Image (tube, helix red, strand yellow):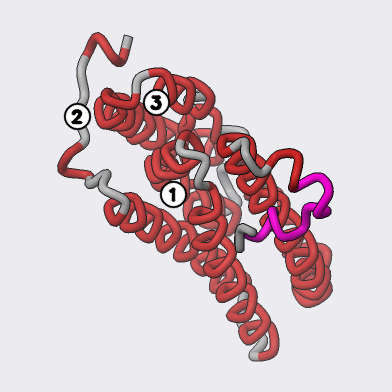
Amino acid sequence: RSSDLALRLIPAFIYKRIEHRTDLLKIVDNIGWLFVDKILRMGVGLLVAVWFARYLGPEQFGLLNFALAFTGLFSAIATLGLQGIVVRDIVRDPDSARLTLGTAALFQLIGGLVAFVLILIAVAYLRPDDRLAQSIVGILGAIQLFKVSEIAVYWFESQVKSKYVVWVQNIIFLVFAIIKVVLILNKVSLSVFVWLMLLEAFLMAIILMIILDIFGISIASLRTSMSRAI
């Protein structure tokens, strides 16, 4: 019997009915890992978030949530809704995966830059005298520049191997959750937490690209074309 996480949770009588369907087993296991990812993030995230909110207080926590929500409004520009399209096209034409991923990466790199610039302009216009809000929004807005690494997520999803993405994301998530607790105990300022969020996004992007390279899709091998972009 498979040692994969989701498959171990399936009742034996159901597993016997589907064990000969390899593709279905891969899909079930993939869904299981995504489910574990959501549960872990919700559970640990809630505990840390409650403690974090009590530590910062209404004013600072409100400012942080404003910055997160404000930058989130521009995330659609950085990602351009490419996930479903990229995954679909890789599944349909595996031989063109590097061309599809490379072109998507270029799109998201440009989209991230545009989103970051718009964030800086918008917050400067809406809060011209609030330097603290501008700095926090600017730091968190820089996370949009790392959206290009999501091509790794797209590729693993297309291969029904999301467990590797889940491993990376949750290890980093847990490490930084522990760091946040340590920082709370040491009573650091809000700006330290904001820079920590940027560092978390940066490390996530780097490690995802490294994992993608380990599985044979190196950055150097990616290609772009105008016809693929269109």
Whether residue 64 is visible: no
Q: How many marks?
A: 3
Q: Secondary structure at mark 1?
A: helix
Front in this rendered view, residue 121 or 97: 97
Front in this rendered view, residue 208 or 140: 208
Q: Secondary structure at mark 2?
A: loop
Q: Amino acid at mark 3?
A: Ile
Q: Residue at x 34, y 50 (%)?
A: 212
Please, is residue 217 above or below residue 201 in the view? above
Q: Amino acid at mark 2?
A: Arg
Horizontal and vertical percent position of residue 39: 76, 58
Badge 2 or badge 1: first in the primary sequence: 1
Classify residue 92 by image quadrant.
Answer: top left
Please, is residue 121 above or below residue 141 in the view? above
Q: Nearer the viewer, mark 2 or mark 1?
A: 2
Horizontal and vertical percent position of residue 79: 48, 31
> How many other residues sit within 10 Å of disc 1, few (<14), some (14-19) or many (≥20)?
many
Badge 2 or badge 3: first in the primary sequence: 3
Q: Which residue is mark 3?
A: 90
The Cα–Cα distance between marks 2 and 3, rounded to whole angstroms, is: 14 Å
Q: Which residue is mark 1?
A: 142
* The C terminus, quarter of image: top left
Q: Which residue is mark 2?
A: 223
Q: Residue at x 64, y 59 (%)?
A: 1
